[in-house]
Image (spheres, rainbow, N blue to C red):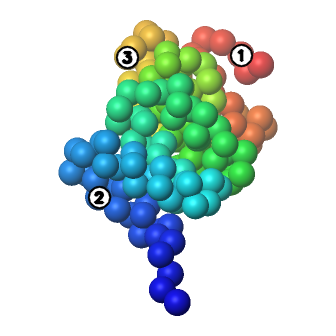
Amino acid sequence: MINTVPDLESQAAEALRHLSAGDLAAAEQACRTALGVDAKNVSAGSALGAVLLAQGRFGEAQAVFSDLVQREPVVFAHWINLGTAQRGMRDYDQAVQAYARAAALGAQDADLEKLDSIARETGTHWRITPLAVERHGASAVPDGRSIR
């Protein structure tokens, strides 16, 4: 018997190839095909979130990445992507918290350059201190304010 169910990891990889090529409709379709087989597939969910970010569909991307951080809370990439979706929605406080969580999980400076973008967009300079991360798990503090 021939297996006609698409390999989900291959579908997710195909989606990312379409995304890289700028074919967002084909990328979204590949993700949704994979998710139709397994709605909880992390690779396909991550790829769908990336496609939605590229399309500027930040609310939908936020929902995808919120689900992923609930299921895989130790994956810093999910937190970075959630922050990016929240930033797109201009929910800067939540975005900074998501980026801070990513930092607490080991994201490197290059992963967190988005904080500089938020500072430019809002005029608020954010800092993530090792002490804040240690004490609060994932706190980002705008300069001049105390940790809540």
Residue indicated by mark 3: 120
- Give the x, y percent position of residue 59: 53, 25
Residue 131 higher or lower than 77, as above or below: above
Q: Tell me the residue at 48%/50% (across/down).
A: 32
Task: Residue 41: give its label.
Answer: none
Q: Is residue 78 visible?
A: yes
Residue 10 higher or lower than 103, as above or below: below
Q: Nearer the viewer, residue 65 or 10?
A: 10
Marks 3 and 2, how far apart in space? 32 Å
Q: Give the class, few, some or many, for how many residues have Cα within 10 Å of label 2's Cα (few <14, many ≥20).
A: some
- The answer to whether 34 appears left or right of 79 in the picture is left
- Give the x, y percent position of residue 52: 43, 36
Q: In terms of secondary structure, where does tag 1 sit?
A: loop
Residue indicated by mark 2: 17
The amino acid sitting under disc 1 is Ser
Rendered image quadrant of residue 75: bottom right
Residue 72 higher or lower than 25, as above or below: below
The amino acid sitting under disc 2 is Arg
- The answer to whether 105 appears left or right of 48 in the picture is right
Closer to the chain start, of discs 1 and 2, is: 2
The amino acid sitting under disc 3 is Arg
Q: Tell me the residue at 73%/21% (across/down).
A: 147
Q: In terms of secondary structure, where does tag 2 sit?
A: helix
- Give the x, y percent position of residue 29: 39, 49
Q: Tell me the residue at 74%/40% (across/down).
A: 137
Q: Tell me the residue at 31%/49% (across/down).
A: 26
Closer to the chain start, of discs 3 and 2, is: 2
Q: Where does the C terminus fall, quadrant-wise?
A: top right
Residue indicated by mark 1: 146
